[in-house]
Amino acid sequence: MSFPVRLAACTATLLVVLPGCRVSPAQGPDVVLPVSWRNAAGFPTASPERDLSSWWSSFGDPQMTRLIREALAGNRDLASAIARVRQAQAQRDAQRASLFPSVDYDGSRSAGKTWNDDSADRSSTSYSAGLSASWEVDFFGKNRQAVLASSAEVEASKENLHSAQAALASEVALAYLDLRSAEDRLAIVKRSLTTREETTQLASWRAQAGEIDQLELRQAESSLETARSQISSQEQNIAQTKNRLALLCGRAPGGVSTGSGAIPSPARRLAVGIPADTIRQRPDVRSAGYQWVAAVARTKVAEAEKLPSLRLSGSLGVDSLSSNKLFNPESIATGLVAGISGPIFDAGRIRANIVAQGAVEEQALLSYQSTVLTALSEVEDALIACRRTGERLATLEKAAASAKQASTLASQKYRSGVIDITTVLDTQRSDLALEESVAAVKADRAAAHIQLYKALGGGWSAGS
């Protein structure tokens, strides 16, 4: 198939893009899709059925897995999305009732008294009961289209829930990466402090012996305190990130246990699917598609307002002079009415409603197309980030190893009096900076893979 290929050519109906759809099939919106990812060279191709619902397990970090599961079970925003699904289902059921007749009952008791000229009074009591039924015959499909729209909105609300699940899982994972990165950088700073304290102590001894002047000593002390100041910054980051994780899990600050561990590493070989498979898996694209289906149906409902409607109604009533004879009444009345009605003049109200709903349909189509393009862009960006962060990490690890050796050699030469304190402090600063960069890029590489999993439509389960 030539590049580019239209989504309509890949699938004959929107249902192929939206598997599991229980609404009527419709021609899918016209969207241009590539046949392959531009930046997926070296990534294996996955099966369309590949399960990405629990992608976090591929990192092999039980703490991260536990936190994500706690968040999916306790997050308040996710619970609100679940409630919105129930609301949409109830509204669909209420709309579906328009396809069936409605039956009502009524009953009454009346009492009266009359006076004659001879001042005698007469009192009377009567009872009545009845049933009434009505049904609007859906000749032109207006009610069926309204039910179709409500059903599509139910599916859209489910996909919004799935989007919330996927977003929450990735947000927890990214917060967990921030925590482990801050902990790693704190450990790096503390190790650096040990080396700088030794250097400062040596400079103090040499200054007392008159081998160096006060300038070198003050430079060593300044470098030591600068490094020490980073401890508070990292401890602040750690505490605030733990609070963020607690909030995501629906707990009060300090309500979750994070344990300890290293920055998690992604799987070595991450498989990606072809673009059409990604579109099928992403809940935000599916939600936008269902919203378009609903908008089309709402337009048809507005157009049906121009057509006549037929309503059938019937009644059955009984009257009795005493309650115990209500079911053996003196009189029975029945009636059946068929009525037809339609608009003649409404000052353009129906036409304006059709135009307005058509604009809503156009917005839904544009939103669908925009969502598809966003999905493609997010996957491409994540693929680039996965590749480039891996390359940057390999380079930085080599640089960090060399900087560590340079710092060790500089300390040895300073002890021997071969070099001055400035060279030692420069190598120590370079060593610390590169170690921190390695920790940061490790987290960035893992974050890029998390974003890729999310962009591929992972993080939710169709059975949830």
Image: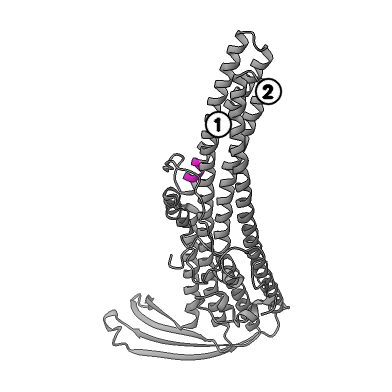
The amino acid type of the residue labelled 1 equals: Val
Quick one: SS at disc 2?
Answer: helix
Q: Nearer the viewer, residue 334 or 19?
A: 19
Query: Where 399 sits versus 362, above or below?
Result: above
The amino acid type of the residue labelled 2 equals: Thr
* Residue 403 coordinates in the image, percent (x, y): 62, 35
The quadrant where residue 45 appears: bottom right
The range drawn in magenta is 242-246
Asked if one can make out residue 432 in the rendered structure from this viewpoint, the answer is no
Decide whether the magenta segment is chiefly helix, strand or loop.
helix
The quarter of the rendered structure image containing the C terminus is: bottom left
Quick one: SS at disc 1?
Answer: helix
What is the number of the mark on residue 422? 2
CA gap, disc 1 to disc 2?
20 Å
- Report which residue position mark 1 lands on: 189
Label 1, residues with CA under 10 Å away: few <14, some 14-19, many ≥20: many
